Image: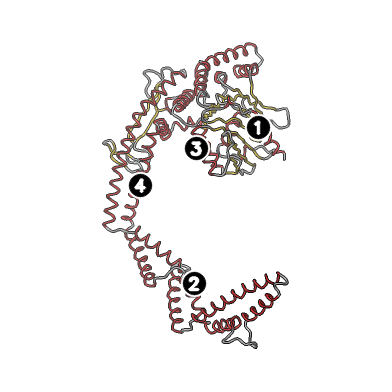
Amino acid sequence: MAESDNKGAFLTRRVVKCQASLLLSLAVLEELRITGLGVIEDTTLPLTSGMNVITGETGAGKTMVVTGLGLLFGGRADAGRVRAQPGRALVEGRLRLTGATATTVHTRIADAGGETDDDGAVLLSRTVTLEGRSRAHVGGRGMPVSMLGEVGEQVVAVHGQSDQLRLLRPAEQRAALDRFAGPEHEKLLAALRETYGQWRQVADDLADRRRNARERHQEADLLRLGLDEITRVDPQPGEDDELKAEAQRLEHAEGLRTAAQTAQQCVAGAGEPTDDTPDVTMLLGAARRALEAQAGVDRMLGDLAARLEEVATLVGDVGAELSAYLAALDADPARLETVYERRAALRALTRKYADDVDGVIAWADRARLRLSELDTSDELLDELERERERLAGEVAELAESLSAARREAAGRFAEQVSVELAGLAMPHARIEVTVLPRTAGRSEPTLRVNGAECGVGPDGADEVELRLLAHPGAPALPLQRGASGGELSRVMLAIEVVFAGSGGPPTLVFDEVDSGVGGQAAVEIGRRLARLARTHQVLVVTHLPQVAAFADRHLVVAKDTGGAVTTSGVRVVEDTERARELARMLAGLPDSDLGIAHAEELLAVAARERRS
């Protein structure tokens, strides 16, 4: 009952806080409620459409907010994060969708049986128990957790320090460039992947037919023997059941004849009817006439007389059918012998190939299909060889086109990221994106692409590497060798700012991507995040006051150690409270006049930047 009351209160708050200022053209996570997760006992985060900043002391539970977001959008559940009381973690969110994103998500939810509110909002929830059991609800309907993941892919992207590590992998760098290149590039990549799959399927089929020719011949011979035997018998669907029924009729023909004749005599009589041997028809006629004689006195007897007439008609029909049955009843011993022989032939098939005749027919169909797969004739091998070469040529052409598209996109991508780095207090740094042929000799196949033999995979024949020139005269080094932790954070943010201009999820979450950064660089990170917030909903978990100052809404996670169990909650800070929080972040002195003055100066600078 308490759970129901809490949910009701939560939904009421959702309605009250639904304001036009919260709307984006695409999507907004309006509110997030977390219960029983880590140090968070029960708290609600009211979120805005711009830049939301979450701060707090170390260990207060800021990470649990990001963990809750991950759960809400289909992330892996960790039962170790669930509080012992109440023994389950609950995360709820209200997501308001408009535009093309709304159409895609609403259609998917409706197909799965969920509902959206009239104003375009969708309610999401995820529950995880101490035992690790997980349940999800989308649009008021229980759903697989994967549905939350599908919604999350459309509306939210979470970036943390693990994303920086992922960006160091060459495959991720290639994927980043492909994402930046745009929809036409993605169509080209999809065409390559489809053609590549067809090419490898034909090549593997051809190799298998050649490598296992002897085994294929042996299997084919066995299948042909079986098909020949079945073809000679030529079983028909349901024939075994029909023959069984016919055999029973022939075996018991005399008993069936006696029963039918007795029934016919009782129903319709035998020859001329007499008073001594009345049949059913005579008795029904006499009963009907007796009732009709008094029908003028009582209408009920007339109704009964009419029903007796119907019964007499039905009895007449039964008598006629019995006559037809007797005429068709066959006691031919020769026919019975033929049925026995046919059933024996069918049983010989069912002992070898299936439980019944229909199964035998199905086995024959499968055998014919398998024979076509086992074909190792020279004609078929030559045909497969030609098809393999044709598809290989198409893959090579598509790979060349994809390489050219990547090189073109690499220049634009590097230039735009470098511009962003200049604004992130790295004015002399540049990003280079190199697109090189993939080295041949790996486990993957090779083709001649752009005039050279190189390895080819479903994503093409290229290796993509992001390199950083930290300052003029410095060598261009791969990110994993040329970037410090702070520099890598800024490179990641610069890439995300560039991505934001080319689409992607409308809600962006940054979990301490500013780690290892300070001073002017921190101010620039805050400025860039504020710029992203003009077109996206941005949620930032940060320890930097320079970043927090740019927030449209500032949320503080505070820890309460007054009780027997440590808990945390989240509150919105504004005006003087916000200045005190920034002062705490600056120097650990929330009540310092100097610290508060510095914080107010930061807020004023950020406000001017947001208005510009």
| CB contact under 8 Å: marks 2 and 4 | no
Front: mark 4 or 1: 4
Say which amino acid is labelled 2: Asp
Label 2 or label 3, whichever comes before in sequence order = 3
Q: Which residue is mark 2?
A: 241
Front: mark 3 or 1: 3
Identify which residue is drawn at 72% across, 40% down.
1
Label 2 or label 1, whichever comes before in sequence order = 1
Q: CA distance from mark 4 to mark 3?
A: 30 Å
Q: CA distance from mark 2 to mark 4?
A: 45 Å
Relative to the observer, which residue lies in front, 156 or 452? 156
Circle on res. 198: 4
Front: mark 2 or 1: 2
Q: Which residue is mark 1?
A: 40
| CB contact under 8 Å: marks 2 and 3 | no
Identify which residue is drawn at 35% across, 31% down.
406
Label 4 or label 3, whichever comes before in sequence order = 3
Q: Which residue is mark 3?
A: 104
Say which amino acid is labelled 3: Thr
Could you say where residue 307 lies in the image, as x and y percent from the top left? 65, 71
